[in-house]
Image (tube, rainbow, N blue to C red):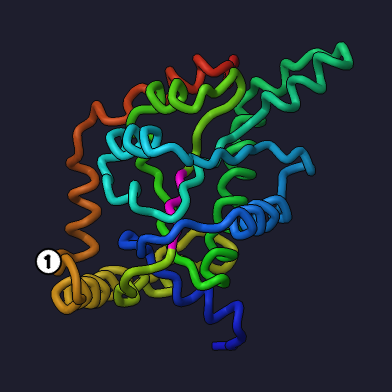
């Protein structure tokens, strides 16, 4: 494998959930936003916005939504939002039919833009000696979050980012074999999938049993099965809430 500073940074990503008691500076926050703004964006439409949660009460409510109260101790918290509202203002100011902004195509474009910007923030943060976790659990109660953030029509929360100075460095979590996630020309699980999965399950089991914090007995297969057994009502209102925000009219 090739190595350089950026590749090493990317291949050593860890989710950080324990932070030192130190807030990010305004300069650091602005630098991270600037990094996000230089991410790729679909059709150069910049279909996302970023909200910093700075008030303790807001962080507390978000902790209740996500079920992860440790986020209140982060050095900074971002919520990244798919956003066609800003482009709606341009359409209305120029007397142009905004129908396209409400379609599934433009909803997904906003999701893509928000997600790519999120990854830029995380990589930039780690390059600055920070750590964090990208959180999809903000979607646990999107109605409540939309009210908390006062999101207008044609916006929708996508991901949260808890950042700060790491209080500890967890062990590097093993990933699936490359042969099982990268294919040439067509989708094709390898003929060795079952054997590869068995070996990977053992790697993950060893990782969880040997890591310094929160060790447990679990394999990758067990984790996926657990995910499939979760409450079916959790996030069951996502499509309804997306439509209520004005998206996917057809």
Residue 124, located in which quarter of the rendered image?
A: bottom right
The residue that label 1 is drawn on is 216
Q: Is residue 148 magenta?
A: no
- The crowd level at tag 1 (other Cα within 10 Å; few <14, some 14-19, many 20+) is few
Q: Residue at x 20, y 76 (%)?
A: 211
The answer to whether 188 is drawn above or below residue 1 in the figure is above
Q: Is residue 247 left or right of residue 37?
A: left
Task: Name which quarter of the figure residue 2 lies in.
Answer: bottom right
Residue 104 seen: yes
Q: Position of residue 196 (x, y in %)?
A: 29, 74
Q: Indicate whether 145 appears above or below 117.
A: above
Q: Position of residue 219 (x, y in %)?
A: 18, 65
Instruction: Tell me which corner region of the image, top left, top right, bottom left or bottom right, holds residue 43.
Output: top right
Q: How many marks?
A: 1
Furthest residue toward right: 94
The image quadrant where one finds the C terminus is top right
**SS category of the residue bearing label 1:** loop
Is 91 left or right of 22, judged from the image as shown?
A: right
Dominant secondary structure of the magenta stretch? strand
Quarter of the picture holding the N terminus: bottom right
Residue 202 in view here: no
Residue at 63%, 38% (x, y): give it: 49
Q: Looking at this view, is 181 or 17 the one in front?
A: 17
Extent of the magenta region? 160-164
Question: Is 2 positioned to the left or the right of 202 in the image?
Answer: right
Q: Residue furthest left?
A: 217
From the viewer's side, name the closer residue of 98 and 179.
98
Residue sitting at 43 percent across and 52 percent down? 162
Q: Residue at x 23, y 72 (%)?
A: 204
Locate residue 106, reporting x and y percent: 66, 30
Q: Is residue 186 toward the left or the right of residue 66 in the image?
A: right
């Amino acid at each position: 494998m090739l190595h350089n500073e950026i590749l090493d940074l990317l291949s050593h990503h860890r989710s950080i959930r324990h932070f030192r008691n130190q807030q990010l500076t305004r300069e650091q926050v602005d630098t991270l936003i600037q990094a996000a703004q230089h991410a790729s964006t679909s059709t150069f439409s910049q279909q996302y916005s970023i909200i910093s949660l700075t008030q303790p009460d807001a962080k507390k409510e978000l902790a209740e939504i996500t079920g992860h109260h440790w986020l209140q101790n982060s050095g900074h918290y971002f919520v990244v939002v798919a956003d066609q509202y800003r482009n709606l203002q341009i359409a209305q100011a120029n007397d142009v039919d905004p129908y396209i902004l409400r379609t599934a195509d433009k909803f997904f474009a906003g999701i893509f833009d928000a997600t790519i910007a999120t990854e830029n923030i995380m990589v930039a943060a780690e390059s600055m000696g920070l750590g964090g976790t990208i959180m999809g659990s903000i979607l646990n109660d999107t109605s409540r979050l939309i009210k908390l953030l006062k999101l207008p029509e044609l916006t929708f929360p996508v991901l949260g980012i808890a950042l700060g100075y790491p209080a500890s460095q967890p062990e590097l979590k093993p990933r699936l074999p490359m042969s099982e996630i990268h294919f040439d020309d067509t989708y094709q699980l390898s003929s060795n999938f079952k054997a590869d999965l068995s070996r990977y399950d053992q790697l993950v089991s060893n990782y969880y049993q040997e890591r310094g914090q929160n060790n447990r007995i679990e394999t990758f297969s067990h984790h996926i099965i657990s995910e499939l057994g979760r409450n079916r009502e959790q996030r069951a209102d996502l499509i309804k809430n997306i439509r209520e925000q004005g998206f996917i009219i057809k």
